[in-house]
Amino acid sequence: MIRILTKADEKSVLEYLYNEPQINIFIIGDIENFGFDVDFQDIYGEFENNQYTSVLLRYRSNVIYYCHNEYFNTEWLPIIKDINTIANSLITFISIALFYFYIHIQPMNI
C-alpha cells in the first residue's frame, strides 16, 4: 500500500530513513527542515505488513525514491508521472534503471 505521509508518521519514517542516513540525507533534511504541511513537498510511504518498504519525497517538481532492498513497485509510476514534468520523469526513470543495473553488476573473479 502506498499513501501520503503526515506529521503522525514523522518518527517512524525517520527511523526507517536513518537506517541508511548517507543515502537518505536529502529526504531526512527536507522532512526535518520543512515537515509535512508545506505546499512544495510531499512524502509518500509504501508499506507491507505495516512496515516501510520504500519512501518517495516530492520536492517541488523533483522526486527522490528510497528502498532498502532491490525492489521497485510499479505502482509508484503514476505518482511520479503526476509529480514530474516529462523531462524529470525521464531522468527519474533513467536513475532508477541505472540504480538497479548497478546493483546487479557482479565483480569479476580474476
Image (cartoon, rainbow, N blue to C red):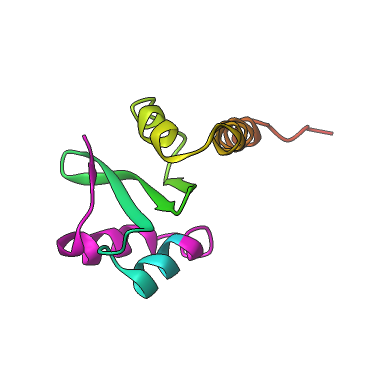
Q: Is 99 located above or below residue 18 in the figure?
A: above
Q: Is residue 7 magenta?
A: yes
Residue most toward the right? 110
- Residue at image x 57%, y 39%? 88
Left or right for 86, reference 77: right
| Total labels drawn | 0
Nearer to the camera, 55 or 41: 41
Nearer to the camera, 100 or 1: 1
Q: Give how far across and how far down residue 60 sits, in percent.
A: 45, 54
- Residue at image x 25%, y 64%? 37
Nearer to the camera, 81 or 50: 81
The reply to whether residue 72 is in sight is no
Q: Give how far across and how far down residue 86 sits, in percent.
A: 55, 31
Residue most toward the bottom? 33
- Residue at image x 61%, y 35%? 87
The reply to whether residue 57 is in sight is yes
Q: Give how far across and how far down residue 70 sits, in percent.
A: 47, 35
The quarter of the rendered structure image containing the N terminus is top left
Q: Is 25 located above or below residue 87 in the figure?
A: below
Residue most toward the top? 74
Left or right for 53, reference 23: left
Q: Is residue 3 magenta?
A: yes
Q: Quadrant of residue 96?
A: top right
Q: Give how far across and how far down residue 43 sits, in percent.
A: 32, 53
- Residue at image x 49%, y 63%? 26
Q: Quadrant of residue 53?
A: top left
Start-end of magenta stretch: 1-26
Left or right for 94, reference 44: right
